[in-house]
Amino acid sequence: MPGLPPHNTAVKAEDGPALDDLFADDDKPKLPSAEATLATMSDLSNPFVMLTYYRRCFPFKQLFLWLNHGQVPTRQFTHREFAMNLPNDVYIRYNSYANAEEMKKDVVRLNPARFEIGPVYSGRPKDKKVLMKNAFKPLLRELVFDIDMTDYDSIRTCCKDKAMCKRCWRFISMAVKVLDETLRNDFGFNHLLWVYSGRRGIHCWVSDPAALALSDDQRRAIVNYIEVIKGGAKQDKKVNLPRPLHPSMLRALETLNNYFPRVVLEDQDCFKDPEQWETILALLPDRKHAEELKKEFEATPSKASAERWKSLLQIKASNELTLRKHRDFVEDIKLQYTYPRIDTEVSKKLNHLLKSPFCIHPGTGRVCVPLLASQVESFDPSAVPTVGQLLMELEELARSGGSVGNGGVDDKTGWEKTSLRPYVELFEKYVEGLVKEGVRGRKEEKAESMEF
Amino acid sequence: MYAGGRQSTSNRNLATAANGSSSAAVAEVSRHAPPRSGKFPHRLNFYEQPPTEEITVEQFEEWAIDRLRLLADIESAQARNKSFEEIKVIVGERAKMYMPLSSDTARSVDVEAERKKDQYSHFVLRLAFCRSEELRARFLKVETTLFRIRFETDDLTERRRFVDSLNFGWDVVGQQEKQELRAQLAAAMRLRDEDKLGAESFFKVDWTQVTDLVSQRKVFLRAGKAYVPSKEELSLVLAEFQNRLYRGLEMTAKALPRLDEDQRLLPVLEHLSMGFQAGITSEYVFSTTGDGEEITAEMVPDLARQSFPMCMRSLEDTLRGSKHLKHEGRQQYNLFLKGIGLSVEEAIVFWRKAFKLITDDAFNKNYKYNIRHGYGLEGSRKNYSPKSCQQIITGATPGPGQAHGCPFRHYSEANLTSSLLTTYGLSGSDTKDIVSAVKSSHYHLACTRLFEIQHAKLGVAKGEGLGKGDSVDHPNRYFDRSRALYKEQREKETSEEGKVKKEEAMDIDG
Ligand SMILES: [Zn+2]
């Protein structure tokens, strides 16, 4: 029987595939007790938790539409690879499904910790073994980007490693802003979905037909065009741009100028400690200027970053070349501290796999929720619902005698009555735009082929 | 130029290799000095016009091979990560020898003959390399590099004339738009001073056409369009060259099944594509005489029993049985025999004797050429190499009546088991070992196991493989190792004989 036992008496068995069918034997996973608590509902090692989430909350229908760009299943969905990450590090690749129902059934059957989305192949991924090598090639794939807070560890001061707070998130906000502008203005892409990765990062999925069809070479070109921050932790100067700056860099700089004082100077206080400002002074082109600043900074150990930055901006030189070099240096530093740091490998390959939206982050239990670039600044990662919260909401609903739905693929009562609702609705609205354009595109194609 | 009768090849074949469009590249009347050649007004060529004159089969092949040398140089240099500048030097040197291509200003050179050779050889290779997607992609890549080398070394005035003649119809950015975007266009060109833009004109193309410029942030982008300054024209020209050649190759591939009017060309084309494929994929370097053991045609059957891997043994047996081998089989076997040290003269003797049902005349006409060709490109580094296991395993699957391929890969289980029994007397656990390796697609291991069994009497133990546990990756390595083992054995025998004699002598003495 579906729902959360033992409060599911209102639901009839014929309303959907009963959970009992899936776990017919006696050792089926059970919640520890009738008094389900947030703690028990958040315990990801209990298979029942993820199972209930997939059955009741996960928006399969919407995910299908997003990948398929239309109601009728096409190769864009049926030939798409899904890779399942099962608990205990078992990884099952090359799953594919005829439609959302079939997918939901299989996800419920396998009950993965999370799953990833790969490219559309020339053949059905599940038939890979029986297909000739030539008949199985990746053809289409969203252009994706991955921004992870770990790449900011050398510049953020508020948190370390896996931790993440609202202040760190502002680095992500800046990155999203700049990437969004670049992808739209420069490359002409329109369908950009941003997805919180559940802990300390964000993914971007570009679903324009032109983006899906990009070759590896073209993806690499985009990455090279965007990538500015280079060099590992050992390298101090991470920005080396030819002058004058390319228009896209100028635009990025203009955008980032609005964030730099607040995020880098105030929030993060990036130039407070000696090892931090020493890095910067080492990059200063005018050595004499650097020496003076060093003395000044050493004499004022408690001075705030904003003050230090002010001193740094002042340069007494009169010759044009020195001034220009200094100006370039200031720009480089700003970019080094604010420009998006992307995980380039993720974006370069057509057949890269990336975690699906609405999966649960195994470390935090948070849902990987979608958001739009315009919302990123006000987005609060700590307010994103966790799977435990969602299940508790359903539990309380059931306790109070409300309808808990049938758990079918069109069943909206699951997510609709939880705090996941605004995120699914946002996703639905976004997908609607994509589907509309897909319909238009197909009509035009048809018209053209008729003429021919 | 024209050799009529039997020797000439119909230009209709080469017309097939054109991309169908016959509109472009008509010699335009120039205001400048008249071009040196009326037929080929430009040194550079987009190869849109198929050749129209008859050439001899010899020219057909020679010219193509000369071009192939340049392309193979490019490909092997690229595989070794040489920079474009380095490749330019290598190819420049090689071109002087085999395929010079001079500008109009060159003195005492028959530019028309040079350009004709360039055009014909390109179209011949198009026919040879259009057959598979992989070959097309490789051909496209090397031809584009060759074009780029020539473009960069072309005389500036002549190059201008050439590009203008192509009428690309690129979207030119209008004065007003250029004015509006002055600042961005200048910045993208890394000009500090907008005024330096001056008369520079810009083309507007999809950014995907100029990925190299996008990669380096050398163009201004807006809404998916790249604004390419005319000084970056090379990128556009190359993209255009590549696009057109890509389409051309696809059309040639579609038209190819109709190309059956001249049977003599097919073996040439196949050898050409094989030479290209074998060029850098096989790392096997064969030495014709390992230990001074000269191999003659008469020795082949015995060697086959002793030392050939199963694939070659099967070709030998088929050849003995049916007195014939089909084309792929001949290719595979001929190169292998070359690899074991059979000279071209001996190879001709060998094949002549083996094809018992065929007259001398038919043999000379249809087969001698193939055999000689397998030994072709003599003295060059780019010799046709014997096929490696990988090439054999991934190559064309043998159809009915064909004996090429890898028995472990291409035989059915029943067929393999019975062959192992009849040919090698294998049964029981040995067969089981081999079959189970085959079942898990480890064809190399199956072959290696057979090697061990076949050479157990020479002291090869299970797991030892070709020595130190090496597995078989090339039929000729199988053979070489086997010969080395026999040689060791012979040496051991002679030295033991000597020892015995010595002992006997001592006995007598004592
Ligand atoms: Zn933080």
Image (tube, coloured by chain):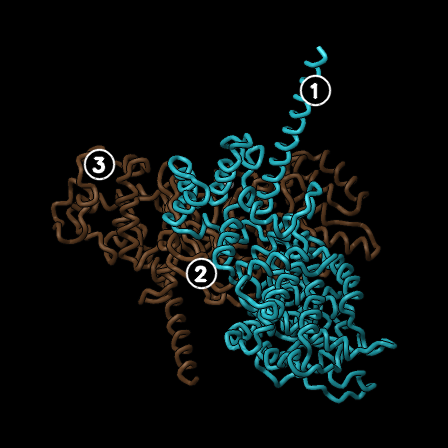
Chain colours: A brown, B cyan
Task: Read off the residue under disc 3.
Answer: A30
Cβ–Cβ below 8 Å for labels 1 and 3?
Answer: no
Q: Position of residue A87 (x, y in %)?
A: 35, 38
Q: What's the residue type where badge 1 is placed?
A: Lys
A225 to the left or right of A7: right
Label 1, label 3: how far apart the Cα atoms are: 88 Å
Q: Residue B89, relative to residue B453: is it above or below?
A: below
Mark identifier at residue B401: 2
Q: Quadrant of residue A426?
A: bottom left
Q: What's the residue type where badge 2 is placed?
A: Gly
Q: Secondary structure at mark 3?
A: loop
Which chain does the numbered disc 3 sit on? Answer: A
The residue positioned farthest toward the front in the image shown:
B508
Label 1, label 2: how far apart the Cα atoms are: 57 Å
Please tell me which residue is depicted at 75% across the width and 52% down the height of the picture: A326
Q: Secondary structure at mark 1?
A: helix
Q: Quadrant of residue A271?
A: top right
Mark identifier at residue B502: 1
Observer-side mark, 1 or 3, equals 1
Between B467 and A30, the residue placed more toward the observer is B467
Cβ–Cβ below 8 Å for labels 1 and 2?
Answer: no
Between B369 and A77, the residue placed more toward the observer is B369
Crowd band around label 2 with a 10 angstrom C-alpha radius: few (<14), some (14–19), many (20+): few
